[in-house]
Image (cartoon, rainbow, N blue to C red):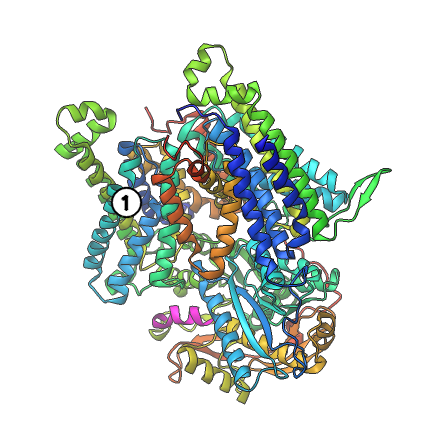
Amino acid sequence: MSGSKKISRRELLKAATVAGIGGMTLGLSKVGEAASPKEKPPAQTKSTKKILGVDVIKLGGQGVISGAHADYGWQIQAGAVLAIDEINAKGGILGSKLELKFMDEELKPAVAVKNARYLATDWGAHLLFGVDSSGSAMAVGPILPELDRICMFDHASTHRLTEELVYGKGIKQIFRIAAPVYQESNLAALIFKDFPNIKRWAGIHCDYEYGYSVWALFKDTLKKYRPDVEFVSIAWAPFWTMDFSSHISAVMAAKPDGIIATPWAGEGVMLLRQALMLGVFDNIQAWFQCMGASVDILEGISNEVAAGKFKDKLWATARYIHNYPDTPENNKFVASFRKRWNRFPNYSAENAYSTIYVFKAALEKCRSLKTSDLIKAMEGLKIMTPAGERFFRPEDHQAIYNVPGGRVVKDPNYPIPVLGDLKVFPAQAYYRNPPFEPLAMAK
Amino acid sequence: MKTRLAILILVVLLALLPAYAGKYALYVAIHILLLSIFSLGFNLLFGYTGLLSFGQAGFYAVGAYGCAKILLAYPSLLVGIVGGVVIAGAVSLLLGFLCIRHTRIYFSMLTLSFGMMIFSLAWKWRDVTGGDDGLVGIPRAPLEIPGLFKINMAPMENYYYVVLAFAILAIYLFYRIVHSPMGLTMQGIRDSETRSVCIGISVRKYRLLSFTIAGMYAGLAGALLPPLESTVTPPLAHWSHSAEPVLATLLGGVYSFSGPIVGSVLFYLLKDIIVRFTEYWQMCLGIIVVVLVMGFRGGVVSIFSRKGGQR
Amino acid sequence: METLVFQGLVGLSVSMYLWLLAAGLTIVFGVLGVLNFAHGSLFMLGAYFTFTYYGLWGVNFWLAIALSLLSVAVVGYFMERFFLRHIYHLDHAYQLLLTFGFILIFDDAAKMIWGGVAKIPAMPSFFEGTVSVVGRPFPFYNLFIIGTGLAVAIVVWLLFEKTWWGKMVRASASDREMASAIGVNIPTLFTGVFVFGAMLAALGGALGTPVRVVAPGIGAAMIIQAFIITVIGGLGNLKGAFVGAIIVGTLSAYGILLFPVFELFLIFLIMAVVLMVKPQGLFGG
């Protein structure tokens, strides 16, 4: 650095002017909104015809739409848009149309919080939904009382969201439509308790909350049924792991019979394909990929499944799978989703689609946009959705519904692999129930 | 006289902001004030001392986690904020002692690695930091001096005034620092290390001082965050967060007192506005950075001042 | 023991991507004095171009790699000729900032062109299969990667040590004015070196395409690792980059096996210690 600089008073003056203009524009953007409101009123335009008092019900969504996990945000958006268009085509909810604004949470809690604040207090969202990462959900949850809005979490799966924040701290504005982390971990334990030859388990897990809780719950539950199993090795992979070879070879060194893995989205595809390269499926009896039945992963390993490379040893679940249950609601949803987007819906799409219908049911029940009324309407709500009947447990606002696990197989009726050999357990068998004991997360 | 008047008007406008701005605007204003404090400290290192740090987010996070831990244990706003600043100051003094041995690219890389070490601690030291979920449920504790007064901080407006007061204090102190003999010495070292050594200045001492003050400013910005958001998470310490004051300072102007402040206002508003219209806000930001480096290295402030953009 | 050997070999194959990335970074720094923050983005572009030619258009795998190297060479040419060249005289901070701006641009451009969803095309069939190493299956592709990495190391070494061009480059790296005085066309030489570095990064990205994930942002995630490697090996030191890449790659592999909890912390700690104790790197003079 060279050249001498003196700070002149003139610069300070210029700075003051610029900063002042900045402050003014902040204020000015509000001037148009009449009557000096401290925030946009939930009802912008009064209309006597409308039961809810608004022409448009504004829905503020967010999910990750950038980076290696971007498909999840896309699926949330696609599911929500489908539901909104269906409802609007039939005249909206109690005569009010739906409008959506969707933002990128970037898997960053600070961004998710800012989005929620912007959507609720500036854009004027009546209802919030979405959020992909657990960290983001744990950050958004606590500000909901201040924003006075409900948020339906569509994907973030940490059990702490409903157990600590809703049940423990009483933040009633949080609801979650997706099955939480214990679905895949306990379900896997229930499935594999019946495989007496699989005695040595290893894990390849996300190096964050999600991976820790899956591994802890899986071990706990399986140990209850099968005192004879051993957990022989574990490898942790942070976000942005570019190469899982080292993780795979590290756990394979312990000669496991079975492997349970959590990396999701593009990382999940990469993990499975690198496991194939390392000949893992010749040396183990089963591999359980927790979110492996998500459409992006099924698409990514389609050729390998068709060629039989996984030797029917790959098992998976997701928080909804498109070939279960065989009900008119699900078949109709999958058909319209395919027609609209030319892809299969993954669980975040179904979760978002059903979110909008849960909002509809709750609004029609309480006929009010007030957060307290909506909370009452949604607690204990039972609703038929594509994934089956969902029940919102009043204690922790967690939706209870049933998702099976199964083998990843090629089915001539579908262009991408699906889950076959489905293992169905009642949801009560693998959900955690209040009062919740904190998980011991020894690593 | 004119300057004082302008500053007075600006302060009055800012003080009246809650009266004419909505809740979200107030939230944005708080974030801009935080970024301004963060960037000012950064620029003491960069603009005044000639050291480009890529690890300032580490000290920001230390301030934030420090304040959060205090508030969770002892809900008093002042104790939390001051505590956060003191802890950040201590950590930056310690790491500064190691970092200022080098300059130029080596300094940048060293600060990057220390910042990322703090990030990795925040991520992995789960018993203390809560891991990737971070610390949640941090109270916006009342502003209290026992026996004197106690102000409820629940309304955003009240907290805005606290942040504004801290920001004005920080800016005023900064003005005093850079115009003191110490500040002038720092600039002398930046311009010619050899000359400074020749006239008997302890270059390291001044660099360490500058590093510690910058760390405390980052810590202050960080400590003001948890009461606002009620959460702190590891990305606060990530190097990509360290890039924010760098970009803001570059945008406003490196070689002016007010550059980082003006830059923070522009950076935050620009990002907030671009994000609403396009998901490609990073590209817009990237183009702005490239244009600034290629043609307007003095930043926005210099475009308005007579000196022009060239050095 | 077998476990350690096998894990080391896996780590070695991971190291080779890092080596290809770090090689270009350190050459460009050594000669031009610019630390290119966007070097990881050139790695990413190499992967995306390969994905397009090979995965989307069905071009032959080898030809696709060659085409993607050329494509990134063009990008590198534009970066150097129209931007970097004009700020060589400035403080290194501005070069870091300019190239940081390019990261933001390249990431969003990739998202605009290829979308946000991660891409992994099918592996060319001639690479499938494994060979037995200490009784465990080791992928043929990883052997190929190790071979390529070593071959590139030899070629680059020959290029810089034995050719006239290499001598000119080294001459201008150590004394620009002197080199210029004896008739070396410095601007052209610099463009050539930058393009060469970009192509090395692109090769790393291209070779990873069939087995690793291609998504916007992988460049920014990789560049920090490349910084660590070049710092450990010594900024501008080619041999150091090679050894540094192997240290970081195998250490991470052993870290996952032996002490999984503080792997990231350890790597940054090593970087900081090297910087403090021996800032010219483990192999610096």
Direction from residue B29 to residue C86 in the image, left or right: left
Please identify the dominant SS of the magenta region: helix
Q: Which residue is mark 1?
A: C79
Instruction: Say above or below: A328 vs C186.
Output: below
- Is the C terminus of chain C in the top left, top right, bottom left or bottom right quadrant? top left
Instruction: Say above or below: A157 vs C181.
Output: below
Direction from residue C75 to residue B269 in the image, left or right: right
The residue that appears at 78% across and 49% down in the rendered structure is B152
Direction from residue B22 to residue B46 in the image, left or right: left
Residue A301 belongs to magenta span:
yes
Q: Residues within 10 Å of mark 1 (few under 14, many from 20)?
A: some
User: Mark 1 falls within which chain?
Assistant: C
Instruction: Say above or below: B111 vs C45.
Output: above
Residue C249 seen in this snapshot: no
Residue A437 seen in this snapshot: yes
- Residue C163, picture quadrant: top left
- The range drawn in magenta is A294-304
Give the x, y percent position of residue C184: 15, 30
Q: Between residues A325 and A70, which one lies in front from this camera angle? A: A70
